Image: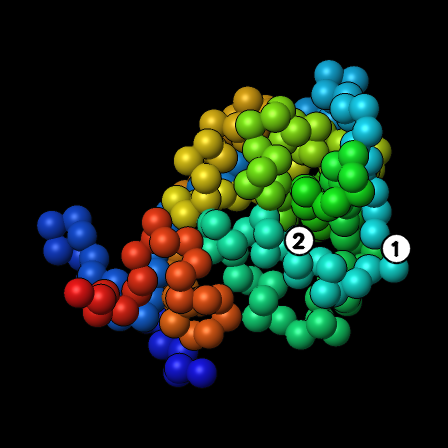
Amino acid sequence: MPNTPSLPTSLALENGFAVVPAGLLATIETSLERTTPPNTDAFPLPPGYAFVQPNPVNPDDFKKLYRAVGDPWLWFGRLQKSDEAIRSILTAPTTTLRYLLDPSGLPIGLFEAEQQDTNTMEVTYFGLVPDATGKKLGSVLMEHGIAAAWKPDIKRVWLHTCTFDSPAALSFYQRQGFKPFRQRLELAPDPRLTGLLPRETAPQIPLADFSDP
């Protein structure tokens, strides 16, 4: 496996631009929050679909759905972790994990949230497989997921998206009542160059080696 490039401690700006070191990808992360409770009545589960808690948690099943949802957008965070670490995260008492199943029983949606303190919950992973988008299932997944994770003392739910995600993600979150509160620049090794993902994954995002003709 190729060596993973080290992250710089700072970037020099020239006329407002910074050169990203070879092997690294740069993305703008936007964090959003909402303070309203879930509204499942407005987004009922369609007939034949199921919203389930996997029991027991199987890391292989999770990674399969994680990749089906996230490969087009270059998700790789969980692929860096061992099965034992994934199981520990997903079975923690502060974690809520739910899958959306289509009428055939196939998992097509992923919702994961973490209660970070008494009043705050983060939606850590959320998304649908490509074939399930455009069917108004995103709102169903979001509202039912938040409802599953909701506690009486929760006052704030937050999440983040980035410029590698679907172009529709930011506007979708805002329609669901989330408001942007922060932007950050994130640098990370290109997972297609470190071997975590195949080189042909997410072709709309240029490879960070910039060596192809």
Q: Is residue 205 visible?
A: yes
From the viewer's side, name the closer residue of 57 and 176. 57
Question: Looking at the image, is mark 2 or mark 1 earlier in the sequence?
Answer: 1
Name the residue type under label 2: Leu
Q: Quadrant of residue 101?
A: top right
Query: Mark 2 packing: few (<14 Cα in 10 Å), some, or many (20+)?
Result: many
Q: Residue at x 55, y 41 (%)?
A: 130
User: x, y (%) of residue 143?
Assistant: 71, 29
Instruction: Please state which amino acid type lies under the numbered disc 1.
Output: Asn
Please name the residue that numbered disc 1 is placed on.
55
Nearer mark to the viewer, of 2 and 1 = 2
Give the residue furthest to the left.
15
Residue 81 at x, y percent in the picture = 62, 71
**Number of numbered callouts drawn:** 2
* Residue 158 seen in this snapshot: no
In the picture of the structure, the residue carrying the numbered disc 2 is 65
Q: Position of residue 181 (x, y in %)?
A: 48, 36
| Residue pictured at 71% horizontal, 72% vertical | 83
Q: Give the distance between the C-alpha atoms of the residues marked 2 and 1, in whole angstroms.
A: 15 Å
Where residue 88 appears, x then y in whole percent? 77, 67
Mark 2 and mark 1 in contact? Answer it, CB < 8 Å: no
Q: Is residue 181 left or right of residue 148?
A: left
Q: Nearer the viewer, residue 213 or 168?
A: 213
Q: Is residue 118 above or below residue 39?
A: below
Residue 38 vertical position relative to residue 5 in the rendered view, above or below = above
Front-lying residue, 122 or 4: 4
Report the side of 130 relative to 7 (left or right): right
Asked if 177 appears above or below 65 in the picture, the reply is above
Image quadrant for the N terminus? bottom left
Name the residue located 82 percent from the left edge and 29 percent from the top edge.
Answer: 48
Residue closest to the far right: 55
- The residue shown at (61%, 35%) is 132
